[in-house]
Image: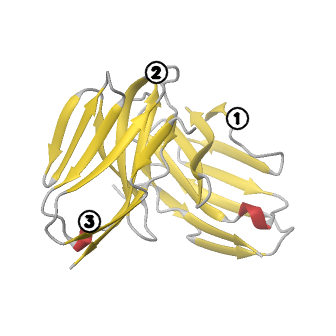
Amino acid sequence: KNEVEQSPQNLTAQEGEFITINCSYSVGISALHWLQQHPGGGIVSLFMLSSGKKKHGRLIATINIQEKHSSLHITASHPRDSAVYICAVGSSSGTYKYIFGTGTRLKVLA
Amino acid sequence: DAGVIQSPRHEVTEMGQEVTLRCKPISGHNSLFWYRQTMMRGLELLIYFNNNVPIDDSGMPEDRFSAKMPNASFSTLKIQPSEPRDSAVYFCASSPTGAYYNEQFFGPGTRLTVL
């Protein structure tokens, strides 16, 4: 079993839909990061969370430390949101290492 | 700032050849990471440098892989000899420090194909 699990693995949505991507982890963490990777493109950090909730534009990220779970929400989804979203946790036993989820491939149709 | 710069962006080579990937981190960042991304295994950390010193190379697959950071503005990842299973996208990332709470800034990646 992977230490960081994401669901769903693939997601297709219609433009305007509310989207939720989930990340569950089994290790103790110091922080959790959500990353975005566009097709053929580089990787961009969206959020770093250690507790609570953060919002940036149409993106909202939440984390529940007790349940070892984080969600990434996209409101009013748009085709340009089509990308792979990757959850990465910073283990509490190491200061620099990310443990990556396998990613969720999102496609938003116009 | 130009961000993390990697070269080449694409590399196609034949099995047995030497491959060198290059990375220029963001100026002022003292931590540098090399990652490999494949469909099967996702993103994997290969090696981590802090202040030009290799701190953790436990992710380097085998002796065919080597990495150097001769100064704060340049790092290389070398594969010699290359094999088809090395085909992947290789990312370099830099960070202000190695601390977990610091964002890592990723380069555009080098797509390596070994025939």
Classify the position of the C terminus of chain B by image quarter: bottom right
Q: What is the image's colouring? A: secondary structure
- Three-letter amino acid code at disc 1? Ser
**Whether residue A17 is situated above or below residue A71 in the rendered picture:** below
Q: Secondary structure at mark 1?
A: loop
**Whether residue A107 is situated above or below residue A56 in the rendered picture:** below
Q: Position of residue B13 (x, y in %)?
A: 75, 75
Q: Is residue B102 visible?
A: no
Residue underneath mark 3: A81
Residue A80: image tag = none
Residue A92: image tag = 2
Which residue is the extreme one toward the bottom?
A110
Q: Position of residue B71 (x, y in %)?
A: 59, 42
Residue underneath mark 1: B58
- As measured in the structure, the alpha-carbon distance from the residue carrying label 2 to the one carrying label 3 is 31 Å
Instruction: Tell which of A68 and B77 is nearer to you.
Output: A68
Chain under callout 1: B
Is disc 3 surrounded by few (<14), some (14 to 19) or many (20+) residues within 10 Å?
some
